[in-house]
């Protein structure tokens, strides 16, 4: 069996080129269409491979599989490029704000002034949680990890908002999207308050999205929270950088859960569960743990040696990416603004940042990391910044989930509205026992 490129039709378009598969034993040939997107690598359409050739593909981790078509986000991993709806992430982080990026991801265009005002008002309208939900929190232990509480509370939204569960109804789909974007900061702040034993603070619709979240998180009834422009801007930027990232593990989880027709709140809860793992969104917390354990630059060599040792499960957290084989552009934005933001936050010297820079410098010169194209990813610097803003590390992944909600929702809506959408159902390469006769218990 081999695959060859058929150059007989080489016109570039949405399709037009083919690869031909030839079964060497039977001589049977089958042409697979090559599909071309607006940008990025072409893909081979294998949808008829089974019916024509009796074959499935084998791709553990889906590294070579395009599971859907999408108009939302584009990544060029070799060049370190990330774009939402054609806009570069660096420009969005510098010049836009989070709700504008939300609108862009959901609707495909940047909003005009009136559209932005109306969208902002809609999101603000939905910031409160059903009053009954406060009792839901009380079932958890106070020392629960905030992600454990968040997964449950977001899943429970489907028990409270019955008028936005019908996924066939466009109006209900939109309502569910707005509710999730609006309620996520309230949930995240309440999760935090619950775990530290402070009363919940209600949302304030006279504040912006990020300001409201900061106020709900850090103010107490006895004392207000001083909103500092530097903190607001830095968090806004972090939210923008995390808003969407193509078909990553949590987004694919949301799509897969949603492909069965499950309600949107349940799908987002599934995405949050996937994000929690240390190989994905949990890495920001793990980076800080790693840097604190390292303590000083004198131990960088020891940690690098451990990361290279195949007998040791330890990995350099915040390093490497399935798609980026270059500097993660989100890490570039964070790294370049780090000193300025830390100084605006009143932190003139952050030893963990200096340590992170030293570790990065040494890793990027090391043959192991160079050969495997392992660069810092978004999680490498975000934790240091969040810590300087006053967030405990157990909240880092919660903040990632808050910001990523819009991406999950936009991707979920795109999937539901895709006429080619079918239930997600991968196949397998079976390596178990061949057929055998059942042995009664007494004979085993
Ligand atoms: N430290 C040491 N070695 C690494 C690392 C690392 N951080 N990342 C990858 N490698 C090695 C890996 O051992 C393998 O080596 P070899 O070819 O000798 O077997 C090679 O590089 C390729 O790695 P892989 O595991 O096949 O790559 P992957 O695409 O399956 O995994 C990853 C990607 C992000 C899970 C992985 O790089 C990793 O575990 N990084 C640390 C965790 C982390 O920072 N995660 C955040 C990801 S970005 C934000 C997000 O998406 O949430």
Image (cartoon, grey):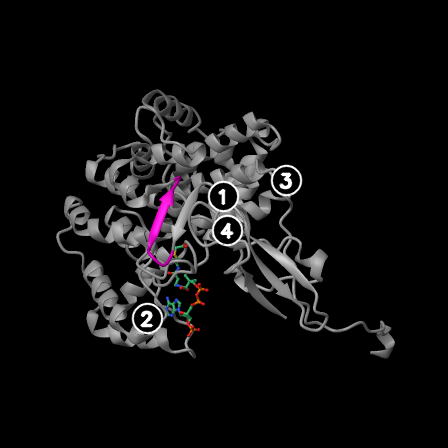
Along the polypeptide, which appears first: circle 3 or circle 1?
1
Q: Nearer the viewer, mark 3 or mark 4?
A: 3
Residue 202: x and y, percent? 38, 30
Along the polypeptide, which appears first: circle 2 or circle 4?
4
In the picture of the structure, the residue carrying the numbered disc 1 is 70
- Distance, label 3 to label 4, CA atoms, is 19 Å
Mark 2 surroundings within 10 Å by alpha-carbon count, few (fewer than 14), some (14 through 19), many (20 or more): some
Q: Residue furthest left?
A: 348
In the picture of the structure, the residue carrying the numbered disc 2 is 369
Left-right relation of 211 to 119: left
- Distance, label 2 to label 4, CA atoms, is 29 Å
**Of helix, strand and loop, which one carries label 3?**
loop
Residue 183 visible in the snapshot: no
Q: What's the magenta region?
A: 77-85
Left-right relation of 358 to 12: left
In the picture of the structure, the residue carrying the numbered disc 3 is 261
Q: Nearer the viewer, mark 3 or mark 2?
A: 2
In the picture of the structure, the residue carrying the numbered disc 4 is 273
Q: Residue at x 55, y 57 (%)?
A: 8
Asked if the residue at tag 4 contacts the one at tag 3, i.e. Cβ–Cβ closer than 8 Å, the answer is no
Q: Nearer the viewer, mark 2 or mark 4?
A: 2
**Ligand 1, what quadrant?**
bottom left
Left-right relation of 362 to 432: left
**Quarter of the image that includes the C terminus:** bottom right
Q: Nearer the viewer, mark 1 or mark 2?
A: 1
Residue 122: x and y, percent? 42, 24
Q: How many marks?
A: 4
């Amino acid at each position: 069996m081999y695959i060859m490129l058929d150059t007989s039709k080489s016109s570039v378009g949405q399709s037009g080129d083919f690869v031909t598969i030839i079964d060497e034993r039977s001589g049977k040939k089958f042409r697979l269409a090559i599909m071309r997107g607006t940008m990025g690598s072409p893909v081979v359409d294998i949808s008829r491979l089974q019916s024509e050739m009796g074959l499935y593909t084998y791709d553990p981790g889906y590294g070579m599989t395009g599971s859907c078509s999408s108009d939302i986000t584009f990544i060029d991993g070799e060049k370190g490029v990330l774009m939402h709806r054609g806009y570069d992430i660096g420009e969005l982080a510098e010049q836009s704000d989070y709700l504008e990026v939300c609108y862009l991801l959901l609707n495909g265009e940047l909003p005009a002034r009136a559209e932005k005002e109306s969208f902002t008002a809609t999101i603000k309208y939905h910031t409160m949680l059903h009053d009954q939900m406060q009792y839901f929190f009380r079932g958890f232990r106070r020392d629960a990890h905030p992600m454990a509480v968040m997964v449950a509370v977001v899943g429970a939204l489907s028990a409270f908002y019955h008028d936005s569960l019908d996924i066939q109804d466009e109006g209900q789909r939109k309502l569910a999207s707005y509710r999730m974007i609006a309620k996520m900061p309230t949930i995240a702040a309440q999760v935090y308050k619950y775990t530290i034993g402070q009363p919940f603070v209600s949302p304030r619709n006279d504040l912006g999205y990020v300001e409201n979240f900061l106020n709900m998180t850090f103010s107490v009834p006895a004392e207000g929270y001083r909103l500092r422009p530097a903190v607001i801007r830095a968090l806004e930027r972090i939210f923008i950088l995390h808003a969407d990232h193509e078909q990553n593990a949590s987004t694919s989880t949301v799509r897969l859960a949603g492909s069965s027709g499950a309600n949107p709140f349940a799908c987002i809860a599934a995405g949050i569960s996937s994000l929690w793992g240390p190989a994905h969104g949990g890495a920001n917390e793990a980076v800080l743990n790693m840097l604190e354990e390292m303590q000083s630059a004198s131990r960088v060599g020891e940690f690098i040696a451990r990361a290279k040792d195949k007998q040791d499960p330890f990995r350099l957290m915040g390093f490497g990416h399935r798609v980026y084989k270059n500097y993660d552009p989100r890490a570039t934005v964070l790294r370049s603004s780090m000193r300025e933001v830390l100084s605006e936050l009143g932190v003139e010297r952050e030893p963990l940042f200096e340590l992170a820079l030293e570790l990065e410098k040494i890793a990027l010169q090391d043959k192991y990391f160079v050969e495997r194209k392992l660069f810092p990813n978004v999680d490498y610097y975000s934790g240091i910044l969040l810590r300087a803003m006053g967030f405990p590390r157990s909240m880092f992944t919660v903040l990632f989930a808050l910001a990523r909600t819009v991406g999950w929702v936009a991707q979920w809506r795109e999937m539901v509205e895709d006429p080619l959408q079918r239930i997600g159902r991968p196949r397998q390469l079976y390596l178990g026992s061949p057929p055998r006769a059942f042995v009664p218990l007494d004979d085993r």
